[in-house]
Amino acid sequence: MTSDTAATAATPAAAKSPRALARARRRHSAVRFWRAYRTHKAGLIGLGTLVVIALAALFAPLLVGADAQSVTDAPGEAMRAPTGEFPLGTDQFGRDLLALLVWGARISLTVGLLAAFLSVAIGTVVGITAGHFRGWYATVIMRVTDWFLVMPTLVLAIALASVMDRSLWTIVVAIGVTTWPTTARLVRAQTLAVESRPYIERAQALGGGHGHIMTRHVLPNVMPLVLAQTTLVISSAILTEATLAFLGLGDPTVVSWGGLLQDAREAGAVSAGDWWYLAPPGIAIAVVALAFTLCGRAVESVLNPRLGVTR
Amino acid sequence: MDTQDQHGRTSTSSHGGARPGPGPRGTRGTRRGRSPLLLAGGALAALGLTAGLATPLNPAPRQAEAKADGKKTLTVAVAQSVDSLSPFLAQRLLSTSIHRLTYEYLTNYDVKDARAIPGFATKWEPSADKLTWTYTIRSNSTWSDGKKATAEDAAWTFNKIMSKEGTATSNSNFVTNFRKVTAPSPTKLVIELKKPQSTMAALDVPIVPKHVWEKVDDIAKFNNDKDFPVVGNGPFVLTDFKVDQYVKLKANKKFWRGAPKFDELVFKTYKDQDAAVAALKKGEVSFVAGQPALTPAQANGLKGEPDVKVNNGPGRRFFAIATNPGARTLDGKKFGDGHPALLDKRVRQALFLSVDRGTIVDKVFQGNAVEGAGYIPPRFSDYAWKPSAEQELTYDPKRAAKLLDDAGYEKNGDGKRVGKDGRPLDFRILCHATDPNDKAVGKYLKEWWGDLGIGLKVNCLDDVSVPWYAGEYDLAFDGWSVNPDPDFVLGIHTCAALPEKAKESAATDNFICDKKYDELYEKQLAEYDPDKRAAIVKQMQSWLYDSGYMNVIAYPNAVEAYRTDQIASLTTMPSAAGNIYGQDGYWSWWSATPASGKGNSDGGGSTGVIIGIAVAAAVLAGAGALVVLRRRATADDRE
């Protein structure tokens, strides 16, 4: 980073194109972000955990075999306790539970990320427009937001998931459209703060339209907030996904952690006391949710200057 | 009739449903104060998912087998809800079982071989022209309010059903052929028929007391659950009912066959089978109904428990895959959106040639089922049928592939089979979200059919009846409990059972309508000679098998369990080896004798608790460690 700064300083500013300058500035701030992030030990632990889990999920076919989910080629006997061959035992079809756990990470992470992205995207659009347009539009849209805010998320998601087809996308949509109000409220508050600054007025005086103000001036300013919010929403999205799958609202033919718990319950693993079937998916869900929360907290305190001041 | 326990629509869809489950804490609240909340929330919710699971100990009060007042109570854990307590409306197995216990039927079934034996009627005989049946009604049966039960009550009941003022929901198939029902004397009931009917000794219709029911304003809407005790003349009297909580019955001391040995019989609702098993281990319930059957893991877990006996007898239901033959109404109007390729018999047969029934019995049912063949379970040996060696569609993917090639569905470049119209063979299968077996078999089908180049989408719903009646499915998991008399389960595949209007509910199972089958159905109904009738019934099953409309995969066993320290003995039906819950009679509960010893009931369930505590401790420790870490990380910033 030091060499970077030196290079920038050494080259005459005029010789650089604006684009290169912007790139350098971005690189600069990324490095600064990383340095600040590094000071948060919990954030590093969370990040490390996530990287490990994400790699495992990504390379699942190489790690545990592409046909681990196949019931017709299941290698073991049904419901066997952990052994050397199957470190976490087998499920009711005789499939290796460790392999299923690794495969399940794919679905849980994918759904968690997509749902969080959808939720934050909806929340950001609603928040920025409500903060920008004010008037009756803001009143109406914020009342809708309030309505979603007081509705129990899970109940709404269950209702949605049960009327739609059983698929991955259903779960993503069900979580996405029910968890956005918090983001919307936060983004709206930030938008109001940003829009009260003089430069917005200046931009308007220079002929900037609504679209220009919202995308060029407000959005970049609320982005840090949105980023931090995303990492925090992911953990709750993963939990909601697991809950919905556990309640039997997921796609029964794909393996996810919540789905594994549901399979275990349906197979009667609870009353039979087959802990190796029940505990690993539950712990995996907890660990991933925790890891995202830790990262989110760290990102939040790095990006939000006000948090930094009080610390 | 107990048959209407359809595996699909109303009956099993009632257990399960949306279970209250642990969910994530919301991420509401102020932005700053969120972190500890979310940390704890995340841990808690995950904990709820594991530990909460491992300890499904119902907080219901401990119900000992002998109460303070010395009453002997038998508690049965059931998963199903009561649809209606009215004998005119009830269709689910639980409700019809309760009617078996609280009302008399003209005839009953022998506990050994299920032949018709005296019930409310002591004797019955047809006239020479086979069109008039005379029943002698017993004179020693009284209603629980003291009035005598007579033939007049029976005549009134049948006439009410025949009036069809919304009163034929459950029993229409028995009376459609009736011309007139009269009671010339208190002990004589005469039924005149339009055509001969072979089911006259197996009329599964509960006889209700006329003097109570004629005061009911609108029988079509009356659920018989307001005035307790409900007047009846069966071995038990219905005394109390709370929706989805319990149904209470007390012994009828004046029952003509002899009073039951237990004083009270309670059907307690446990939506979750695992919770019911835990309650059995704790001694809170005496019996767990095998509907749905206990899973192999549950049964194996219970086998090791002291004072618990697992009953694993041949069941009376079949588990099948039905194909949509093109939904249509009585007057031939087509509706629904079933895949057109399924209209080709070769495609249907190819599908079933690629289902390895043996593997499903071994892996999904883990031996707790008998491999499927004919439509009627082998338990009913008079009517059960098996395909001959050359007729049999055994697991043979090569033959299936050839059939599909012949039918014009060749594999394209992607390995998918595509019809001449360019439509790929992508099927949907309706599955009951509440039935684990459906989902498990769905996984196998997806792989077997996938190898063949056929796509499958497993569409699991809590309530399959809407797409089912609308004909909006290609394939569906299907299943019925079969009565000793097979008329009902055969009748649901006749043209007469088709709906009058599109998407309307009807008696039809999956819209089969075939002239040859209908002729055979009429023939068997009119045939009074048991052997000849059985031969016709077998022909009908042979036709069904060849048609590829119904692929009977297995006959699942009734896997149920009870506490031997609360119930000393019980009668299964058939008595040699059979089921206890959902019998074609009241034998199990009527014959159950209470155990003398109190028995301990604290041993069980502890494994679950220990696991729960261990997991809880592990997660809490993890969360605690992180909190400490965080505190350390921010130690510099705090004062």
Image (spheres, rainbow, N blue to C red):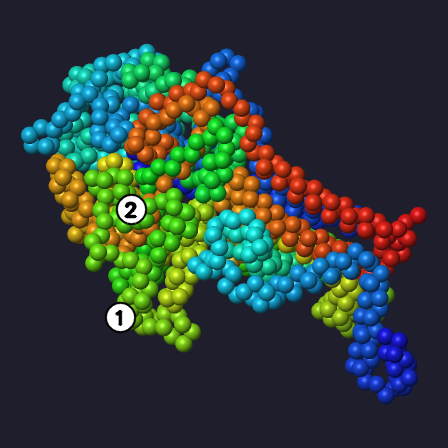
Residues under numbered marks 2 and 1 in contact, where contact means CB atoms less than 8 Å apart: no
The correct choice, above or below, for A243 with respect to B2 in the image is below
Q: Nearer the viewer, residue B489 or B303?
A: B303
Quick one: which residue is furthest to the front in this view? A84
Towards the viewer: B342 or B316: B316
Relative image position of residue B274 (x, y in whole percent)? 51, 38
Q: Is residue B523 visible?
A: yes
Reading the image, the residue beneath label 2 is B508
The residue type indicated by label 2 comes to Thr
Q: Residue at x 11, y 28 (%)?
A: B126
Chain of the residue displaying label 2? B
Q: Is residue B404 visible?
A: no
> Which quadrant does the N terminus of chain B fall into?
top left
Q: Quadrant of residue B112?
A: top left
> The disc numbered 1 marks a residue on which chain?
B
Q: Could you tell me which residue is drawn at 59 percent across and 65 percent down?
A: A63
The residue that disc 1 covers is B406
